[in-house]
Amino acid sequence: MSTTTLPPTMKALLQETKNGPLVPKSIPTPNPGPGSVVVKVLANLLQHQTPGILSGKAGFTYPTPMIPGGRAVGRIAATGPDTTCLSEGQLVLLEPFIRARDDADTWIFWGAMEGTSEGSKKLFADNWRYATFAEYVKAPLENTWALDEKRLCGELGYTIPELVQLSVDVVAYSGLKGIGLRPGERLIVTPATGLFSGAAVGVAVAMGASVLVTGRNERALQRLVDAHPKLVSSVLRTNDIEVDVKNLQKHGTVDAFLEFTPMGAEGSTHVRAAFGALKQHGRACIMGFGGGAMKDVEIPMMDIVFKSITVHGHAMYRGQDVKEMIKMAEAGVLRLGKERGFDSVTEFKMDDFERGFDWVGENHELGQMAVLVP
Ligand SMILES: NC(=O)c1ccc[n+]([C@@H]2O[C@H](COP(=O)([O-])OP(=O)(O)OC[C@H]3O[C@@H](n4cnc5c(N)ncnc54)[C@H](OP(=O)(O)O)[C@@H]3O)[C@@H](O)[C@H]2O)c1
C-alpha cells in the first residue's frame, strides 16, 4: 500500500439524477482498498455515443449519482494493500468491462451500464458507480493494465491520448480471436468506418489478415487504404446485394467477416452481402448492437446452411485479450495514431466537456478522436 497523500478533494463530472445533466463537482478523492488502485487520469476517450447513454436514448440503465467514462489512460497515484506489480507513477490503461470476482459471467460496463442481473446491478451500485471522468479514479486491479511508457511514448513516439485507442481496439481483437482469424486470411469488416468497426481494421492487419473495408463514405474508406495500402482494399457499398457480393468477391476468397452495425442502420443490406461473399465454411462475427445485423435485416439462411457458415456472436473481451493486445502494441505490430490513419487527437479540458461532446458529435468520422483531459 503506498503512502502518498492524495488531495482531499477532486474535480469530477457527476450525473446526479437519472438522465440529468453532467455537473462539474468537487468531491472527496477516493482511496484504494483491497483489489483496487487509485489512478490519476490523464486522458479519457470522448465517445460520440456517451450523450445517448446519459440521456437514456441508448437504453443502457444504471443508478445515479454516477460518473461516466471507463476508457482512459492515467498514472497510478496510490496502490492498495494487495497491489503486487503496479507502483506509483506507472502509466496504465483503464478499460470498462468489469466482471464480478466471484462470478465471471456477471459483468458491467463501468461508467455506462449496470448489466441485467441482480448481481451485476449490485456490483455497479455498491462498488463501481464512479468511472474516469474525474481527476482521480478508484479502479479495479483487473481493469488496470501497465503500459511500457518508454517503449510506447519514447521509442514508438505515441502521445498519451493516442494510447487511449487501445481501450477500443481490444473489443475488435477479442471478436477476431473469437472467430480464430489467422494470418494470411481475407476478412471483411462491415461497416468499417465507425469507432469500433474502424478499430477492427488496424487490429486485423496487426493479426496478419488482409481486409476488405466496406461502407458508403469513400473518403473515410480511403483513409484506411492509405494507412495500409498493401493490406486493405475498399469496396464502396451500393446496397444492391448482388452487386455488393460480386464486388466483395472480386478480391479473392473471403474467409471471414466481422460486423459492427450501429443503431440506425436498420434496412441496410451490408450484413447480408457479407454472408453472400463468404466462402464455404466461412466464419461470421456479429458484434454490433444495431438493427442492421440481426434484428431487422433478414439473415440469409440458405447461405448459412449451404455454405456451412459458423456464426459467432461476441461481446467485449477477457483480461487475457487486453494483455495480448498491449503486447502487440508494445511490439510495434499493432500501430496507433497517424500510422493507423488518425489525425492528432483533439483535447478538451474537463470544464469544457460540453464543447467536447459537441465536437465528437460532429467529428466522429474515422480518423478523428477526442479526449477529455482533467
Ligand atoms: N459487441 C461488443 O462488444 C461491442 C462493443 C462496443 C460497441 N459495440 C456496438 O457496435 C456498434 C458499432 O459501434 P461503432 O462505435 O463502430 O459505431 P459508429 O461509430 O456509430 O458506427 C459508424 C459506422 O456505421 C455505419 N453506418 C451508420 N449508419 C449506417 C446505416 N444506416 N447503414 C449502414 N451503415 C451505417 C457508418 O458507415 P458509413 O461510413 O457508410 O456512414 C460507420 O462505418 C454499436 O452498436 C456499438 O454499440 C459492440
Image (spheres, grey):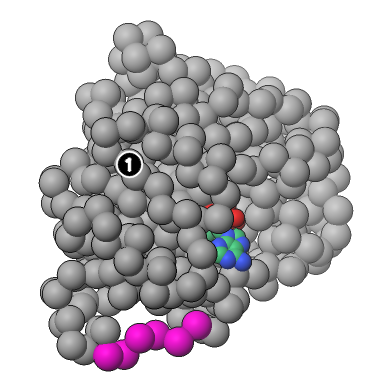
Q: Position of residue 9 (x, y in %)?
A: 74, 30
Q: Residue at x 23, y 24 (%)?
A: 331
Looking at the rendered structure, the kind of residue marked 1 is Val
225 drawn magenta: no
Could you say which is closer to the camera, residue 185 or residue 47? Answer: 185
Q: Residue at x 31, y 90 (%)?
A: 301
Q: Position of residue 57 (x, y in %)?
A: 74, 69
Reading the image, the residue beneath label 1 is 232
Q: Quadrant of the C terminus?
A: top right
Check disc 1 and report its element: helix, strand or loop: strand
Q: Quadrant of the N terminus?
A: top left
User: Which region shows up in magenta?
Assistant: 297-302
* The image quarter in which residue 326 lies: top left
User: Main SS type for the magenta part?
Assistant: loop
User: Vertical placement of 24 versus 146: above or below?
Assistant: below
Q: Residue at x 43, y 74 (%)?
A: 241
Could you say which is closer to the camera, residue 235 or residue 311? Answer: 235
